[in-house]
Image (spheres, rainbow, N blue to C red):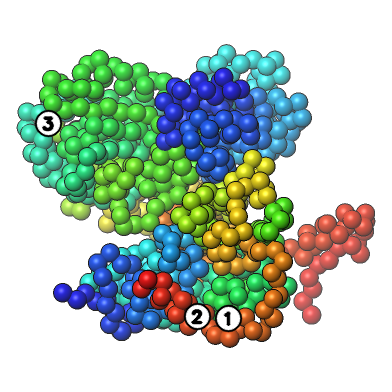
């Protein structure tokens, strides 16, 4: 073990900021992070063992106890559930003869749920030893069970198990054609660097992750800071359930994204960039490295880019299963080898970001657009979309429609138009912007995609009239409680309480006052949480409670009070101890 | 030029670089808090010190005071919401005040009284948490930990050690001890360390000192927490 870890740490140049990369390697080698490994890493990196333990416990893909040689995770996104995930999971668990969440006694295999893996257009999806599995069905599960029994290494499994389709159905300004390698940089050098920032400004480009901060302004703030070093970070931690457009962009337009980052580096004066890639997209890692290598050979990265005095390079860092790392300051913490806890603001990343240096963090699609704008100029882009939301937006459409996949639309497009294009009928509603966004009903399909109306980072999930609103909300609320980082009280405790309160109502244990209590809790979590996760975690309840109050009310019992716990289930320990299970050992609440 | 903010209409002067909490404490204005301590870098996690700054909720212990801010601190809404937040802390852990040695000296209890908390409101989690009684002089009762991070900061910033850390994610968050065995007895904590005395609740206690002051004569039995805190922290801010 010592030899292996020594090598991994050496490969990572003994840098504590590379802790996640080091732990990923250890996890892969041993199926967990052994105690002994923690001691060795702590000594080699000269950091506290507690930092390592806390990082291991924070990220879903790290474990302190051994996992199976084949570690299988099934995506628990609502879209996977709609494609029959629950039944498949049951089948999988019976065929493998293990319970969900367990490691089989022979240590060969483990099975568990995981948050959305970004394959919503081709689910039910999963991961085996970190690699994406798509289009799971009973037949494929039988095949996988067989391969595991034969102990066939994952890299010898049939290739088509891992095929990820693009499913692009509509392209526009951004996706019609990828720019020629180097064109954006040539255009920038010809026009001038500050003039290129002017073009970005003219374009009106706003951040594509969902929050919509003005991109030129962010870059300018960063450029104006006095500092010895600055950083460019591309946020590819695409964790919002229902979003997979960055997966598509990085598969097909990675050159352009890297070029956008390079344009940004020139404008703000950075020499180092990072692509923070979510762990679920591990399968993209090698091809992205190849592209970076190719760009270095072309003189588009490294020293004296295109014979100018620009120097810039990009490093790819993999996440390890934590939705919160999509929040920019949590992402920076993660890049520094720590738990992904959002920082206090101010200071903002543009003044104190990575290693406390001025840092620009932008979404994959923002850099993609910036590269294109550097060539075509800001006006072309600004002519598209609406006044407040210029340009186009790339959507990831999934759920109940005949053509799930990637669609590019100018801002201002109606929901109705999108639904027609993706082949959705009998629509109950649409979740725009993922669980943290908003659920809109069939009476709102004239609303438009735009920052001033329906903002979205790209997630667009369609539900037909056979779906149950409460099932959807339940899935989303579970997601937030699972992904809360735990830093602040209202989100840590509040999201778990929200889950309890919602389940109480859904399971038929709610009584008069419970919906009001649910609403009150939502307001607290929304108004007092530290970051965007907590501030939006109650949205699934709030947006459906507002539109369908009767659905919640109908669940309530006609009694004045029900306790927040299941009376009968609470007696289970007592029954076990007393070794009895007769009628008198059970209790039900009766209204006097 | 003298700079001022307004807290509930009262004019409060501040110096460049001060947080709202610092300015308020100097002006004898109490803002409830648990994870904040004037000797340490602000943390901003308990959210009890949330105030409304120009209509927006901000954490007073981390948010900088800026000229012209209109701050709400004691509105009914804020006090009610803070009560709910402290109730969350009560149901998350296992806080049994009548049988806790810290009763009367406990800041969690003190702030709860200040906010007029009369019940738990939320269902209990009944978290299964352990005790660490391994150390000869110091006891950790994880049932009472509220993750204020003060022992972590005190150990790092005052004692020059690294005895504690916060681990886990979300509701599985936990306090861990920096030793090979994970037990306090094998860490390099000393009974005289600040980290051993800073706990605002009864999660970290010094052994063989219990009940020396009878219940009824303890700090918050004699004076409400806002008064105690202001006189205590006022000095620290000035010093």
Tell me what residue is drawn at x 39 percent, y 66 percent. B61
Q: Secondary structure at mark 1?
A: helix
Q: Chain of mark 1?
A: B
Residue B204: x, y in percent?
63, 62
Q: Secondary structure at mark 2?
A: helix
Question: Which part of the image, by quadrant, shows the C terminus of chain A?
Answer: bottom right
Q: Are marks 3 and 1 in contact (CB under 8 Å)?
A: no
Residue A111, compared with residue B203, is above or below; it is: above
Q: Chain of mark 2?
A: B
Residue A546: x, y in percent?
46, 66
Q: Nearer the viewer, residue B187 or A481?
A: B187
Question: Relative to A513, is A104 on the left or the right?
Answer: right
Q: Which residue is mark 2?
A: B228
Any part of residue A441 in sight:
no
Q: Are marks 2 and 1 in contact (CB under 8 Å)?
A: yes
Q: Which residue is mark 3?
A: A188
Tell me what residue is drawn at x 41 percent, y 59 percent. B41
Circles 2 and 1 on the same subunit = yes
**Residue A425 occupies quadrant:** top left
Mark 1, Cα crowd under 10 Å, few <14 / some 14-19 / many 20+, is many
**Residue B95 occupies quadrant:** bottom right
Residue A103: x, y in percent?
71, 33
**Residue A281 occupies quadrant:** top left
Residue B4: x, y in percent?
24, 76
Q: Which residue is mark 1?
A: B220
Mark 3, Cα crowd under 10 Å, few <14 / some 14-19 / many 20+, is many
């Amino acid at each position: 073990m010592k030899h292996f870890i020594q090598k991994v740490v050496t490969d990572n140049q003994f840098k504590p900021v590379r802790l996640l990369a080091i732990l990923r390697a250890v996890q892969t080698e041993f199926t967990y992070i052994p105690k002994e490994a923690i001691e060795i890493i702590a000594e080699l990196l000269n950091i506290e063992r507690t930092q390592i333990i806390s990082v291991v416990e924070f990220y879903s893909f790290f474990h302190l106890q051994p996992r199976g040689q084949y570690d299988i995770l099934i995506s628990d996104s609502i879209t996977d559930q709609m494609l029959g995930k629950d039944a498949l999971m049951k089948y999988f668990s019976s065929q493998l003869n293990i319970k969900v969440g367990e490691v089989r006694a022979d240590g060969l295999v483990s099975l568990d749920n995981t948050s959305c893996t970004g394959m919503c257009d081709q689910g039910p999806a999963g991961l085996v030893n970190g690699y994406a599995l798509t289009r799971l069905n009973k037949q494929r599960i039988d095949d996988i069970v067989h391969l595991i029994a034969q102990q066939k290494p994952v890299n010898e499994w049939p290739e088509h198990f891992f095929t990820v389709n693009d499913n692009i159905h509509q392209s526009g300004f951004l996706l019609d054609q990828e720019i020629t390698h180097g064109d954006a940089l040539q255009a920038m050098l010809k026009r001038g660097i500050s003039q290129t920032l002017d073009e970005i400004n003219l374009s009106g480009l706003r951040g594509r992750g969902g929050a919509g901060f003005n991109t030129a302004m962010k870059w300018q703030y960063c450029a104006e800071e006095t500092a010895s070093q600055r950083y460019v970070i591309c946020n590819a931690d695409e964790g919002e359930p229902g979003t997979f457009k960055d997966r598509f962009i990085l598969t097909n337009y990675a050159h352009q994204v890297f070029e956008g980052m390079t344009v940004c580096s020139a404008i703000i004066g950075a020499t180092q960039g990072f692509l923070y890639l979510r762990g679920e997209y591990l399968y993209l890692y090698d091809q992205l490295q190849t592209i970076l290598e190719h760009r270095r050979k072309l003189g588009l990265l490294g020293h004296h880019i295109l014979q100018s005095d620009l120097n810039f390079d990009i490093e790819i860092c993999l996440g390890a299963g934590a939705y919160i790392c999509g929040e920019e300051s949590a992402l920076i913490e993660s890049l520094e080898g720590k738990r992904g806890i959002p920082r206090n603001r101010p200071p903002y990343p543009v003044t104190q970001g990575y290693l406390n240096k001025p840092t620009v963090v932008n979404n994959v699609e923002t850099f993609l657009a910036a590269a294109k704008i550097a060539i075509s100029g800001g006006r072309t882009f600004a002519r598209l979309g609406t006044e407040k939301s210029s340009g186009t937006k790339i959507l990831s459409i999934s759920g109940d429609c005949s053509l799930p996949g990637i669609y590019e639309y100018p801002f201002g497009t109606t929901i109705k138009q999108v639904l027609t294009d993706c082949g959705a009928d009998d629509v109950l509603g649409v979740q725009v912007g993922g669980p943290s966004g908003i659920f809109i009903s069939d009476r709102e399909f004239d609303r438009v995609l735009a920052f001033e109306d329906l903002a979205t980072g790209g997630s667009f999930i369609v539900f037909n009239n056979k779906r149950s609103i409460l099932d959807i909300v339940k899935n989303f609320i579970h997601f937030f409680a699972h992904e809360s980082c735990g830093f602040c009280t209202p989100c840590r405790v509040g999201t778990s309480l929200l889950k309890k309160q919602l389940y109480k109502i859904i399971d038929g244990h709610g009584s008069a006052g419970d919906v009001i209590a649910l609403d009150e809790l939502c307001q607290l979590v929304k108004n007092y949480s530290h970051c965007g996760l907590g501030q939006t975690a109650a949205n699934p309840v709030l947006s459906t409670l507002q539109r369908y109050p009767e659905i919640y009310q109908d669940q309530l019992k006609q009694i004045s009070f029900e306790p927040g716990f299941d009376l009968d289930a609470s007696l289970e320990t007592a029954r076990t101890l007393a070794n009895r299970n007769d009628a008198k050992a059970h209790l039900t609440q009766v209204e006097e | 030029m003298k700079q001022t903010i307004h807290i509930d209409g009262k004019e409060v002067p501040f110096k460049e670089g001060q947080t709202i909490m610092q300015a308020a404490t100097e002006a004898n204005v109490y803002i409830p808090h648990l994870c904040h301590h004037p000797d340490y870098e602000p943390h901003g996690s308990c959210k009890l010190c949330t105030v409304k700054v120009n209509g927006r909720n901000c954490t007073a212990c981390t948010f900088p005071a800026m000229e012209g801010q209109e701050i709400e601190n004691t509105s009914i809404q804020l006090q009610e919401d803070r009560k709910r937040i402290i109730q969350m802390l009560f149901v998350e852990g296992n806080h049994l005040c009548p049988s806790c040695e810290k009763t009367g000296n406990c800041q969690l209890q003190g702030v709860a009284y200040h906010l007029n908390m009369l019940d738990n409101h939320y269902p209990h989690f009944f978290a299964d948490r352990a005790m660490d009684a391994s150390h000869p002089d110091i006891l950790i009762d994880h049932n009472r930990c509220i993750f204020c991070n003060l022992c972590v900061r005190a150990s790092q910033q005052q004692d020059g050690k690294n005895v504690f850390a916060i681990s886990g994610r979300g509701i599985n968050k936990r306090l861990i001890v920096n030793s090979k065995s994970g037990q306090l007895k094998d860490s390099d904590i000393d009974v005289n360390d600040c980290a051993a005395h800073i706990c605002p609740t009864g999660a970290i206690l010094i052994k063989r000192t219990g009940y020396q002051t009878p219940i009824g004569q303890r700090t918050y039995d004699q004076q409400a927490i806002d008064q105690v805190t202001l006189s205590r922290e006022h000095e620290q801010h000035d010093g």
